[in-house]
Amino acid sequence: MTEQTRMEKLFLHAARELNATIEYEDLVRLVMELTMEAVDAEAAMIHRIDANVDKVRARFLNRGSRDVVYFKLPKGKGLIGWVAENREPVIVNDVNKDERFYTPIHDIIDKQFRSVIIVPLIGRGRVIGVVEAINKCSGEFTDRDLDTLFGLANQFAVAIDNASLLREAKNEAMKRRLLFQVGTKLSSTLNIDEVLKLILDSLHKVVKFDAGGVYLINEREGDISSVYAEGYDKENEKFVHMKFGQGLVGWSAKTGEALIIPNVASDNRYVDARPTTRSELVAPMKIDGRVIGVMNLESDNSDSFDADSLDLLTAFASQAAISVERALLHKKMLESKRLEEQLAIARQIQLTFLPKGDPSLPGYDISGVNIPSEEVGGDYFDFIKIIEHQTGISIADVSGKGIPAALIMASYRASLIAEIRNNYAIRTICGKVNRLLHESVEQGNYVTAFYGVLDSKNDIFTFSNCGHNRPVLYRENGSVEYLLEGGPALGVIKDSVYEERPIFLRPGDVIVFYTDGVTEVVNNEGKEFGLEGLVALIKKYRKLPAREIHRKIYNEITAFASPRHNFDDLTMIVIKKL
């Protein structure tokens, strides 16, 4: 068999094997096996290089073995660092005579290196890694071996890059699915342990860790205590209760910052609550910027966590924060003996989710207000920062009053924000929130809502009206439009379909969003203020700043109302295009 024929058969065999393997780990193993076969090597390694990660992720395989060894190396070190930086292959038949060789590798994988061939893997114009053949079985590596491995490298790079993209897509889909499942569970139960167990169980599917816990801050006592933990020795109970600022968990609670600790032994903040722990990941649980607790994960291996792990833990910590906040407030309400105390707590839930101030957007004057009635209602409005130049505008009204309405409002808000983070279209967001509410609230409860996104750069407002009162768009030329497009109220019909509509805003245009507490005010004669009355006030005060517009409307409504009228919550948002 000629050398050309042997090479052609080898490349054809490699192409068939690589094209038949799509699972990432199986493919990497195959690449190492093909590398050893192609150049008659004792072992092979794959080094994956990611510009966003400061370590090189490596896999090692001995000839005839099925056990892949996983480890990490400092980026830029050794011959692999040289090859990656220079994008050139290298052949070295005596590594002890090459000062570029990274000698600690002998101890890391318990293998004595004599000779190596290292070839860069280039995918889509960038170095994604290197493949390394180790120790020629007989004799020395030759230029022919280098040409052979270099010829295979392009096939390797394409296959690994495609498998990596597929793995990332699968991981992202799994993360979203898990977050949705947790969000669904969060909205259907007030049992803290049940939800937190679900969160840690879900994290296990995408992040490897050996112990994990959730800690809550007791502001009055100035300490932190565990509410749920897995993988810890019960004899270390003293570490479940810590002073504020103590340990990595306490530091995160105090500063509100997340931490990745590759080696806990080198961090003097670490409290040795678990002797086998080598690395740790910590993320604060926040509600509207306020830290209420901390989630942490611990691993028995050093350098186990990366930026992706931290992003995922942070997302789950947000879910946990909502669950814990809801559950604790609900527990307080159940313990309250007086109706007034229950209503105050429910109102506290409602106020927690209302914006702390009006947004400041170039070219726009925006202001919102919620004026509660004596009873706690289910009104809600929010300004949600999505990306630069895009702001979510939401107003909603939950059926009923009191504690049940406040809790349903909390479920609606949590569901809405979770779906917004997934970057779905507005009509899709409404559909998913509707399905979640239908599955999680009792029959007969529902939410009328309006959600839109203001693109302040292009002056486009895209919205969907989910059975809510029709917002009024008062144009500068005096014409009036009503924002009707959307679908039915949320939570009524499981598979409701929603539409969205974009509108272009011009200088002088005014949009007023409101709940029924604004238009259903009744005077002494039993006459309702109504939508026509609201439109007349918008026309009258449209030249004023947004805050003054809703203030004037409120004053006019209260003057119109009968002294015997029982006010509902009054909620308004005013958007003016400057």
Image: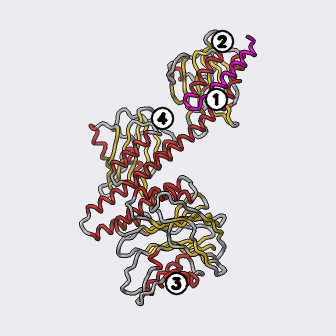
Circle nearer the N terminus (3, 2): 2
Structural crowding at the residue carrying mark 4, measured as other residues with C-alpha within 10 Å and reported as few (<14), some (14–19) or many (≥20):
some
Q: Would you place residue 272 above or below residue 478 in this image?
A: above
Q: Secondary structure at mark 3?
A: helix
Q: Identify the residue position indicated by label 4 in the image.
A: 303
Q: Residue at 32% across / 69% down in the picture? A: 343
Q: Looking at the rendered structure, which numbered label has been put on residue 357?
A: none
Q: Nearer the viewer, residue 438 or 501?
A: 438
The residue singled out by tag 1 in the image is 19
Task: Name the disc covering residue 140, or none.
Answer: 2
Crowdedness of circle 3 by 10 Å Cα count: few (<14), some, many (20+)?
Answer: some
Q: How far apart are the alpha carbons under marks 3 and 4?
A: 65 Å
Residue 387 in the image: state x and y as whole percent. Answer: 58, 57
> Relative to 167, is 521 on the left or the right?
left
211 in the magenta segment: no
Looking at the rendered structure, the kind of residue marked 2 is Glu
Label 2: which secondary element? loop
Give the amino acid at mark 4.
Asp
**Mark 1 to mark 2 CA distance (whole Å):** 31 Å
Q: Secondary structure at mark 4?
A: loop
Name the residue that disc number 3 marks.
Answer: 533
Cα gap from disc 3 to disc 2, whole angstroms: 93 Å
Asked whether disc 3 touches disc 4, contact meaning CB atoms under 8 Å apart, the reply is no
Q: Amino acid at mark 1?
A: Asn
